[in-house]
Image (cartoon, rainbow, N blue to C red):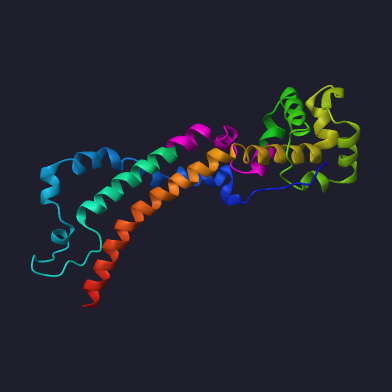
Amino acid sequence: MSEWKSEHHLLQWPFVKSYAGSEFVKFAAAVPVFGYLILFNDDVIASLSFSRIAGVETNEHDPFWLSSLTKLRLAFFGGIFMLAANFLQTWRSPRTLAHSSTDFEFADRVVSTHSFGEIVAMQKEVLSDEWVWRTPMMKSLNRNSRELEIKHPDYSAYADKTVILRKGQDYLRGLSREWWSGQMHKDWAWRYTIIALASIGYIMLILPTLDITQAVIVDLIR
């Protein structure tokens, strides 16, 4: 068994899903729909002024760093990036993540609901030469479970699932958590792309907020 290696949790699918699939992102993804009606309407653009909304008189110094149009554009395109990130994470994230948000939860699900055939298929995938070990737990199981793993690399010798649970539940749970962790490391290119798209979207949405915030703070100080 080769050494295990795991990417940082901020690069795995559970974080990607929460980062690019939160309720805030879903709300921000709706911005382009309404932003299009504003951003490309000359009459609205001509009448919209954040200085006017903030109560700044025309002869007073503009407290904002960014123009009204720039802030609208940042919000609009930030929403576009959020929309793309949310769509991609929904499309590419592992299906098992929708049912089990942690490896412990998945292990419980395997023990209680998975069939004998599903367990055999899962183990065959984990013990294949192409598999990259993602957890140290398969090495830290008790002596009996380690011997079970070495002597019986395939559960096909057993008649049913009850025998598996009686003779090697520790091994089964370790195997389940390893498989789940492996799924959370799949499609690294998609994971990195989604994180990058969402990050750009967050930055574009934060900039107008920071600009408005600093203007309000300056006004309060004065």
Residue at 32% across / 62% down in the picture?
A: 210
Asked whether, in this view, residue 135 is left or right of residue 95, the answer is right
Residue at 13% across / 45% down in the picture?
A: 44
Asked whether, in this view, residue 76 is left or right of residue 157, the answer is left
User: x%, y% of residue 84?
Assistant: 41, 38
Residue at 84% across / 34% down in the picture?
A: 166
Asked whether, in this view, residue 182 is left or right of residue 14, the answer is right
Q: Nearer the viewer, residue 169 or 77?
A: 77
Residue 88 is covered by the magenta coloring: yes
Asked whether, in this view, residue 177 is left or right of residue 53, the answer is right
Give the residues drawn in magenta, as a range: 87-108
Residue 32 is covered by the magenta coloring: no
Q: Nearer the viewer, residue 141 or 105?
A: 141
Work out whether 207 lies above or below 23. Answer: below
User: x%, y% of residue 201?
Assistant: 39, 48
In the rendered image, the quadrant that contains the N terminus is top right
Q: Nearer the viewer, residue 67 or 171?
A: 67
Q: Main secondary structure of the magenta part?
A: helix
Residue at 67% across / 41% down in the picture?
A: 181
